[in-house]
Image (cartoon, helix red, strand yellow):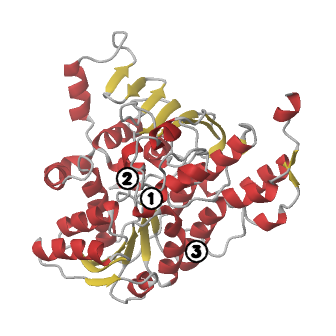
Amino acid sequence: MQNKFKRRRFIKNAAALAALVGLPGKNSFAKAETDDLLDAACRSLPAKGKPVFGLKVPPIKQVGVGIIGLGNRGYEHARLINAVGLEKTKLVAICDIRPEIAKRSADFLKENGGQEPQVYSGKADDWKQLCQRDDIDLVIIATHWDEHVPMALYAMQQGKHVALEVPAALTIEECWKLVNTAEETQRNCMMLENVCYGNEELWLLNMVEKGIFGTLTYAECAYIHDLRELLFSKTYYYKQWRTYHILERDGNLYPTHGLGPVAQYMGVGRGDRFDFLVSMSSLQAGMDAHSDTVEPDNDFYKKKGFKHGDINNCLIKTDKGRSILLQHDVVSCRPYNRINMLTGTKAFHKGYPSKLSINGHAHGFLSDDDYKTYREMHAHPLWEKLQKLAEKNGGHGGMDFVMLWRMIDCFNRGLPLDMDVYDAAAWSVVTPLSELSVQLGSVPVRFPDFTRGGWQEERKLGVMAG
């Protein structure tokens, strides 16, 4: 038993593990020890271009947009980009391998605003034609996870800016490819982390920026969402792609909804950085049990041996000494929760439901009236400006609309985007690092520094700069 937890030990399936988490040079790990894998995981790769901190491009009066993937998220992006309005953006082209899915979006756009984008559908590489168009400035990628990086790289190489769904990448190597290609092409690569634009999250960010929380020390965040019905659905996820990830991988497969806002509160990448994590998964039982309840013609009927533990916990330490507890649970009956807990020397917040405690007040949370006062006093200007439009157009309570409106507005005005490729990489790399930690007995795993030291400069977050 003692040998199981020794840091330095031989890994029989080192090459397979290196390939799973996508270590650069993964083919060289035919024989390796634990330390070899851990060192490779945090190793920086040579730069191929100049940094893209605060990347600006000339103002684009009407942003030409192409969308690849028109299923659950892509259809919503098309609907909301349309709602942003033709004075700011135009949907030039849309693409989905399924003709009937592409037609659904095309019909909606024609009936609701009169937009008639070029439709690409039916062939596996039709999306490349979309990326090659000269009248597209921004490509939105809303396909299944495995396609995010290949499509993003190609789009940037065609001179396009990219906004891609979460997580941006699945492996360490993919994260580096996004960073290097963005730097090489000087194109924006923003992950569409909608929760960073939630009303509660921007309110908290505003209070942090004003110093109301004092010095931040600790946070808890999560993606807790019972997806069993959807994971076993034969139609919701294209060819049940997400279920195969849970079948084959064990770690935190969906970290960014909870972690993204916390990273922004703490200035990760802008004065602080994720240093290392420790990850641990519970036993797997929920998927095995639910497989007995689905229809016999389902590919996962009575399927056993899913690798993903029901609940994964990651404990992350930052360079400044802050700690973050991050949870992933998509198969238990726990009610939906992102936790959104934040601790500072002067204030404390917990979400679901949102409650606030301020140092100097009576012990416990603020009364409803006092809480309302803080919400109104420190509401984020972006939400104050867009609240009516957000309520009208919706999208996860309006956060989707606010996110897309703000992104397009930044292009219109020639401003840097709120989130950059370094954020996309740092938040997404939690998945392969957590897998590595779990497989090696929950050992600490250090984060790669995708900024190559640039994180040490305290930079104001775009959404707080105007």
Q: Can residue 305 be seen from the camera position used here?
A: yes
Question: Left or right: where does residue 36 sit relative to residue 86?
Answer: right
Name the mark nearer the viewer: 1 or 3.
1
Residue visible at 17% across and 71% down in the picture: 108
C-alpha span from label 2 to label 1: 7 Å
Q: In this image, 24 relative to 353: left or right?
A: right
Residue 400: percent from left, percent from top:
29, 55
Q: Are marks 2 and 1 in contact (CB under 8 Å)?
A: yes
The secondary structure type at the circle numbered 2 is loop
> Circle 3 is placed at which residue position?
181
Q: Is residue 106 above or below residue 406?
A: below
**Label 3 residue SS:** helix
Give residue 331's position: percent from left, percent from top.
Answer: 46, 39
Check disc 1 and report the residue beneath it.
Answer: 240
Amino acid at pointer 2: Ser
Disc 1 crowd rating (10 Å Cα; few below 14, some 14-19, many 20+) is some
Residue depicted at 36% across the width and 31% down the height: 335
Residue highlighted by disc 2: 233
The three-letter amino acid code for the residue at tag 3 is Thr
For label 3, the crowd category at 10 Å Cα-Cα, with few meaning under 14, some 14 to 19 and many 20 or more, is many
3 or 2: mark nearer the eye: 2
Residue type, mark 1 in image: Gln
Choose between 298 and 63: the one closer to the eye. 298
Numbered label attached to residue 16: none
Q: Quadrant of residue 193?
A: bottom left
Say left or right for 307 vs 388: right
